[in-house]
Amino acid sequence: MKHILVTGANGFVGQALTRRLLADGACERLTLVDLTLDDAPDDPRVRRVAGSIAEDGVLAAALEPGCDGVFHLASLPGGAAERQHALGLDVNLRATLTLLELLRQRAVENPGQPATRLVFTSTIAVYGSPLPDRVDDATPTRPTLSYGAQKLAAEILLSDYGRRGWVDGCALRLPGIVARPPAPNGLLSAFMSEIFWALAAGRPFVCPVSAQAVAWWMSVGTCVDNLLHAAGLPPATLAERRVFTLPVLRLTIADLVDGLAARFGEDRRRLVTHAPDPALEAGFGAFPPLDATAAAAVGFRHDGDVGALIRRALAA
């Protein structure tokens, strides 16, 4: 792809994806969109469009004069979308529909040209909470947060636009991506990243879930691998399925602490204390086994083991 658009480019995953695209020489032109882009790379291939994707004209400006591929990462995350329903609806759903419509218009105006590849980051929140005893490709979606409902609605629209040939879309349901730098970000799952940085730095960490809490994990490096893999899937593959729940590592907090202690020293264990929040543990510490057969069959991957997860999570 010669010209790639990345929405949410200043976010945690967006920055990692941008660095990889530029380092790999994967594009001739890279348009980045986010509220602010002060940290965007200083590279002649980079074009910046600052503003909210929910604002009139921002996405249209970003798509000029057209692009070969779009990574649509921008969103208002779970906790923030629950507190600010109208904003979540604007960012997570209405802006996605605007993007789909702009790409549809381009497809209609350029018959015979390949539809634009759109990689959309959805979420495991589409399954709701509590989760069933097992999740697989046939598990029903029943979101219990507005964020999950908005992302699910966007998945349905993407699949419909793909069915009609207007967009060559692919949606990836992401688990917790680690290790996000400490910052106010509206994520209820922020503790899943904070524990990495605290123990790596030798700081005490009060964990808001128990040692036995189990979650699905993926490093930002592996997340970027999967995004790029989605961008390169043959159109015929996506004609069969456009929405994938990705393979994950399923680990307890104790498993993660074991891995961090093995890397940084046994003294890290005594830095961790637990003050479980029952509601948080129910939502982010009770993940069942996940069978991601459809995604694995077309080449999506998890980190492999806890050591690789830690190494790749902290490399960012």
Image: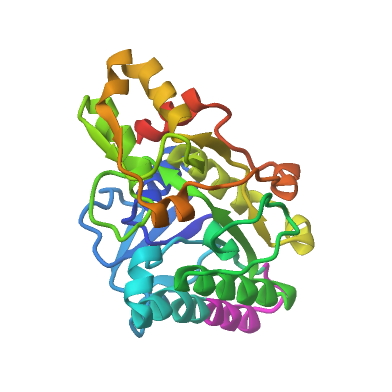
Please state the horizontal and vertical placement of residue 252, each as a whole percent of the image.
Answer: 49, 35
Is 35 placed left or right of 142 in the picture? left
Instruction: Provide the residue span drawn in magenta.
Output: 100-114
Residue 234 lies, with reference to residue 260, above or below; the image says below
Q: Residue at x 74, y 74 (%)?
A: 163
Q: Is residue 110 magenta?
A: yes
Residue 260 lies, with reference to residue 100, above or below; the image says above
Q: Residue at x 47, y 40 (%)?
A: 213
Q: Residue at x 28, y 26 (%)?
A: 200
Is 149 placed left or right of 6 in the picture? right
Quarter of the figure that contains the N terminus: bottom right
Residue 167 lies, with reference to residue 120, above or below; the image says below
Front position in the image: 67 or 166 = 166
Q: Which image quarter: residue 64? A: bottom left
Please state the horizontal and vertical placement of residue 3, each as a whole percent of the image.
Answer: 48, 59
Please state the horizontal and vertical placement of residue 112, each as a whole percent of the image.
Answer: 72, 74
Q: Would residue 74 be seen by someone viewing this image from the given angle?
A: yes
Is 105 placed left or right of 224 in the picture? right
Q: Which image quarter: residue 205? A: top left
- Magenta segment, prevailing SS (helix, strand or loop): helix
